[in-house]
Image: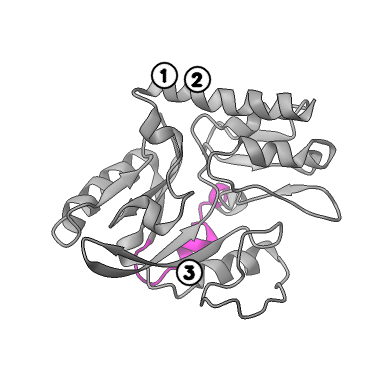
Amino acid sequence: MNGKSFLVDLTRCTACRGCQIACKQWKKLPAEKTTNWGSYQNPKDLSSTTIRLVRFEEAVEDGKLFWLFFPEQCRHCVDAPCSTVPDNPEAIIHDPETGAVVYTELTAKEDGESIRMACPYDIPRVDPVTKVVNKCDMCIDRVRAGKLPACVQACPTGTMNFGDREDMLKLGQERLAAAKKKYPKAMLVDPDSTRVIYLAGVSPDSYSKYLESDASDAMPDKMSRKRFLAGLGARARTMRS
């Protein structure tokens, strides 16, 4: 499997939110008016204009308190179930060179909520006015120009990494070995099925219920997982009709 991948090392994230701001700036996405809801996380959730969000969470594991930060984005699934939902195959494009899953404006003619429901990570969001479905596109314009995605370029701590998939998987194993010295339960999250590979220091559920796909624990092998993800897309189409 070729193409590009991210490695997101959550053990290094300080929640500076540089990646979140850089995403807004590069994509020219407007700011959102928010209110204090009891967390430093802001805004509260992803939206059609906030396609990258650093989530904050406090968790207790083995009697230890952790303050966890999770820069959330589209995972660019290797076999993307969302891409099986639209009637028009050009609405969601799986770029053969990078592996990026790219939504086009043609998603406005599709059932956006069905596309969202097909995603095992609950990432896509529908613009309430235009009805276009929006999410991270891997900064594919920058990548094709030989540049890093904006979020990676802005990251000061080494949390965000990007490159050829083989290199990112190798880096992931190196970072994992180092992280286990401090975080014995550290793991790479869904490395075989996504192009955005997270290194979690503690249980993925402690960061977010959507850090790890529900399919990860339930599916015993890659082929079963592939069938499961395809079923998510089929279920979304059935609900739409």
Q: Which residues are magenta?
A: 143-159
Q: Pointer 2 and pointer 1: residues touching (CB < 8 Å)?
A: yes
In which quarter of the view is residue 112 placed?
Answer: top right
Residue 227 is marked as 2
Residue 204 is covered by the magenta coloring: no
Which color scheme does this rendered protein use?
A: one colour
Three-letter code for the amino acid on which mark 2 is drawn? Arg
Picture coordinates of residue 215 (x, y %)?
A: 44, 33
Three-letter code for the amino acid on which mark 1 is drawn? Met
Of 226 and 30, which appears nearest the observer? Answer: 226
Q: Is residue 234 above or below residue 28?
A: above
Residue 214 is marked as none
Please identify the quadrant where the N terminus is shown.
top left
In this rendering, would 164 be left or right of 117? left
Residue at 69% in and 35% down: 92
Q: Secondary structure beneath disc 2?
A: helix
Q: Is residue 8 above or below residue 197?
A: below
Task: Check disc 1 and report the residue beneath it.
Answer: 223
Task: Check disc 3 and report the residue beneath it.
Answer: 154
In which quarter of the view is residue 84 placed?
Answer: top right
Picture coordinates of residue 98 (x, y %)?
A: 52, 39
